[in-house]
Every structure is written in structure tokens, then in C-alpha cells.
Image (cartoon, grey):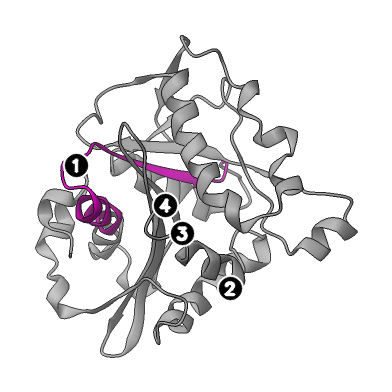
């Protein structure tokens, strides 16, 4: 199931004029897919050295979560050359389908062409494919802005334009599990979860600027349920990953612009 213009974000009108038929699209849902390595290599080159990209064996385990959850990589080429790649996981819950947005990488020559908007639409299409009528929440883990890395500000502006809001980091300190190999974790004295901003796009609710602590907790619980089977239990038990530290369930939290 390919995305339609209805799956594009409010700020991605430019993408509607870009015809996806001009590209070759490979939707990868198994580690033995012949296109897996071509999709994985650019992601590892971009994010591996920052410890922000899972190892091959971790992703192989994530593919095996199906049918309870669906992990997908989308590789886009043009004339056989790399154009873009992303990966994401649809996680059904009782209330909604939470889609975890892992990575999104667009080749320099295809940036500002509208392709990035279509790459943001593929996770919505996956959620619709699994449960056509369920509400959809997209969740992205984004680095905090840093003066020495202008690309972070560019990415945050892109997500802001696409209708994402971030959970107030003064109220919720979200952390991503430690992606390093177990032997590296042990050699360094234990896991070091990374602090990230939690960005959300609640499809059809983009104009709501508050969220309950219960809803945040439910979304994060879904993300950690996705991560859990691929990581050691002792690494997932780090205090930074403990939801008990979140505000009480009846608390109302602000949803802020990602660049705020």
C-alpha cells in the first residue's frame, strides 16, 4: 500500500506535485529481503558512528516482531541510484496505532524536491494498511538543537512544518535505549540511554497543543515494548527508561513547536 496525498502532512503541499512513479520504491519487511543491505548501508553510514543506528541483528529481531508489530524499511531509488531511505515500526495498541519513526535520510540532490514529505507519509500508509480505521500517532525521537550541528535545526524545522509537536522536555525527559553492542555497554560500565526530544504528530489532531501524561506514558510504553525484545533486560531496566518518573496521569502537558 503506497501513501496517497491524503497521507501527506499539512505542510507538505509541495510533495503532492512530485510523482512517486518517477522513482523505484522498495518496501522491505524481512532481513533476508534482497534490498535490505542497500537500505541499511546509508543509514549506518549516517547514524552508526553516533550510536543512533541499530545493528543489523537488532533490526533482524525487529522484523520478527510481526504480526504483533510491523517493522518496515523503505528504500527509494531513481535510475538505480540512492534517493532516500527510512525505517519505522507500526505498534497497535487498544486506543490507536503508534508508529515509531526511526530514521529518515534523503540524498542531498533530492532535498527540497518534495520527496522528504512522501517519506514522512509512508509510516501513515503502513498504519492505515494494518488498521484502516484506528487513530494514528507518529512518534519521532529527535536530538536537542546544538550550535555545532546545523543539520539538527534543519531537521527540527522540517518536522515542525510537517505538523509535529514536542512533549515539553521540562516535564518529560525521554530517553532512547543504548544502541551499542552489549560488549561495548559492559566495557563502559553499563548502559547509557540517550536523551531525546519526543515529537508527536497525532493525525487529525495537529491543532491540539496539550496532551495528558497518561497518553504520553501510553505512547512511550508502546515504543519501549518495541525496543524491549531486541535489548537485554538489564539494559532496558536503566532508571532513565522508567516511566514512573513521568508526571502523574491526570497532569496536562504542553505540546510545543519542535524548534522552541
Q: Nearer the viewer, residue 147 or 233?
A: 233
Which numbered disc covers residue 65? 3
The label nearer to you, 2 versus 4, is: 2
Per the rendered image, the range of residues in magenta is 121-144
Q: Residues within 10 Å of mark 1 (few under 14, many from 20)?
A: few
What residue is drawn where x is 72% and y is 39%? 237
**Which residue is located at x 17 percent, y 65 percent?**
2
| Residue that numbered label 1 is attached to | 10
Task: Inspect the magenta stretch and tell me whether residue 139 lies in it.
Answer: yes
Q: What kind of element bears circle 4?
A: strand
Q: Which residue is mark 2?
A: 56
Q: Which residue is mark 4?
A: 101
- How would you rate the neighbour count of disc 3 (Cα within 10 Å): few for under 14, some for 14-19, many for 20 or more? some
Q: Residues within 10 Å of mark 2 (few under 14, many from 20)?
A: some
C-alpha separation, residue under disc 2 versus residue under disc 4? 17 Å
Which sits earlier in the primary sequence, circle 1 or circle 3? 1
Mark 4 neighbour density, 10 Å: few (under 14) some (14–19) many (20 or more): many
Q: Position of residue 102 (x, y in %)?
A: 47, 55
In the rendered image, which quarter contains the N terminus? bottom left
Of labels 1 and 4, earlier in sequence is: 1
Task: Give the number of the disc on residue 141.
Answer: none
Q: Residue at x 44, y 45 (%)?
A: 140
One can see residue 83 in this view: yes
Q: Nearer the viewer, residue 178 or 10?
A: 178
Place residue 218 in its image quadrant. top left
Mark 3 vs mark 4: give the one in front: 3
Amino acid at each position: 500500500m503506497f501513501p496517497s496525498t491524503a497521507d501527506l502532512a499539512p505542510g507538505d503541499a509541495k510533495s503532492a506535485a512530485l510523482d512517486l512513479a518517477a522513482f523505484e520504491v522498495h518496501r522491505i519487511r524481512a532481513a533476508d529481503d534482497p534490498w535490505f543491505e542497500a537500505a541499511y548501508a546509508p543509514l549506518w553510514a549516517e547514524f552508526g558512528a553516533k550510536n543512533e543506528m541499530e545493528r543489523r541483528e537488532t533490526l533482524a529481531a525487529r522484523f520478527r516482531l510481526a504480526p504483533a508489530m510491523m517493522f518496515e524499511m523503505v528504500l527509494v531509488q531513481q535510475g538505480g541510484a540512492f534517493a532516500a531511505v527510512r525505517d519505522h515500526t507500526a505498534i497497535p495498541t487498544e486506543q490507536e496505532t503508534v508508529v515509531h519513526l526511526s530514521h529518515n535520510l534523503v540524498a542531498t540532490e533530492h532535498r527540497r524536491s518534495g520527496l522528504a514529505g512522501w517519506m514522512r507519509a509512508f509510516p501513515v500508509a503502513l498504519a492505515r494498511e494494518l488498521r484502516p480505521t484506528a487513530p494514528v500517532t507518529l512518534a519521532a525521537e529527535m536530538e536537542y538543537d546544538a550550535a555545532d550541528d546545523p543539520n539538527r535545526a534543519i531537521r527540527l524545522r522540517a518536522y515542525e512544518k510537517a505538523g509535529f509537536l514536542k512533549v515539553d522536555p521540562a516535564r518529560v525527559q525521554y530517553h532512547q535505549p543504548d544502541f551499542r553492542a552489549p560488549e561495548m555497554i559492559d566495557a563502559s560500565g553499563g548502559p547509557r540511554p540517550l536523551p531525546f526530544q519526543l515529537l508527536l504528530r497525532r493525525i487529525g489532531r495537529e491543532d491540539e497543543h496539550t496532551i495528558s501524561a497518561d497518553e504520553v506514558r501510553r505512547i512511550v510504553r508502546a515504543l519501549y515494548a518495541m525496543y524491549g525484545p531486541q535489548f537485554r533486560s538489564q539494559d532496558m531496566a536503566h532508571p532513565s527508561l522508567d516511566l514512573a518518573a513521568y508526571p502523574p496521569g491526570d497532569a496536562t502537558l504542553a505540546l510545543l513547536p519542535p524548534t522552541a
